Every structure is written in C-alpha cells, then in structure tokens.
C-alpha cells in the first residue's frame, strides 16, 4: 500500500509541475496583453507598477516580474481591509475601475500556479513521509 501511495504522489508531483508550467506559459503569452492594459490604467508617477514597467522589458523574466506586480496589486486592491488598500496605492491607483475579464486574465493563471505548487509540495512531503 505504501508503495502505491508513493507512486501516486510521484504522478501528482510530475503532473503538477507540468500544469504549473502551463499556467506560467498562459501568464506570459495570452494573459500578458491584459497585464499591459491593467498597467496602463493603474500606473501613477509614484507607483511601483510604472517603475517596474520602465525597468523590465518584454522578455520572459521581465514579463514574469510585471505579471507578479500586477497580481500583487489586484490581490491587495480587492481585499477589504484598509491596510491592504494603502499597500495597493503604493503600486498603483486603487480607485480605477478595471474590467472583470482583465482581472480574471491576470489572477486566474497565477492563482492556478500557486495552488498547483501547494498540491505539489504536499505530495512531495507525502513521498518523504512514507
């Protein structure tokens, strides 16, 4: 029984890594168009999103950095606490209306990647524990 669980967990780890890579591919290809649109809407002169957009180019690493900043902005902006809204104001303008479809293209692939990472870590811990 233990060997079957280890094999199943190994398959979960392998599948999770592939699924996470697929999420990253979606973020830096299809979703990046919406990230750029969100950046244009919310960027301010003092905000971190505008400086990140100027520093990092459109290469693979630059796109990942820009996606992560917009992801953090959207998570902080959509939280209900005033503390997080102030932190979102450091990144960009939290009062701008952003279409839900743009937010979905920025949030869902990143949340999928992080959720898959959590499953992979738990499955890896199971492999080590058994």
Image (cartoon, grey):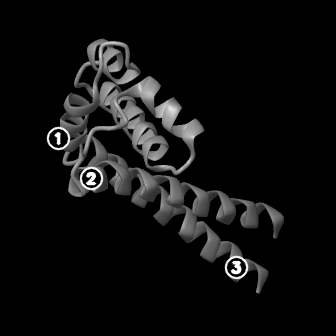
Q: How crowded is mark 1: few (under 14 residues within 10 Å), some or many (20 or more)?
A: some
- Residue 33: which numbered mark, if any? 1
What x and y, as percent, mark residue 121? 65, 57
Left or right of 6? Residue 29 is left
Instruction: Work out how far the residue at label 2 is from the one at label 1, CA to CA, in angstroms.
Output: 9 Å
Determine which quarter of the picture holds residue 126.
Answer: bottom right
Residue of label 2: 105
What x and y, as percent, mark residue 74? 40, 43
What x and y, as percent, mark residue 21? 39, 51
Looking at the image, do the residues carrying marks 2 and 1 touch, with CB atoms under 8 Å apart?
yes
Residue drawn at x 20%, y 43% is 34
Left or right of 104? Residue 111 is right
Foreground: disc 2 or disc 3:
2
**In the rendered view of the protein, which quadrant contains the N terminus?**
bottom right
What x and y, as percent, mark residue 76? 49, 42
Residue drawn at x 63%, y 71% is 9
* Camera-side residue of 83 and 47: 83
């Amino acid at each position: 029984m233990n060997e079957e669980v280890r094999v199943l967990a190994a398959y979960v780890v392998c599948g999770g890594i592939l699924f996470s890579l697929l999420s990253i591919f979606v973020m830096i290809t299809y979703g990046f168009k919406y990230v750029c649109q969100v950046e244009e809407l919310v960027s301010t002169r003092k905000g971190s999103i505008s400086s990140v957009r100027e520093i990092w180019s459109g290469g693979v690493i630059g796109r990942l950095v820009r996606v992560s900043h917009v992801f953090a902005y959207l998570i902080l902006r959509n939280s209900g606490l005033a503390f997080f809204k102030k932190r979102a104001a450091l990144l960009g303008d939290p009062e701008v209306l952003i279409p839900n479809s743009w937010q979905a293209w920025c949030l869902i692939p990143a949340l999928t990647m992080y959720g898959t990472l959590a499953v992979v870590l738990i499955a890896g811990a199971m492999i080590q524990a058994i």
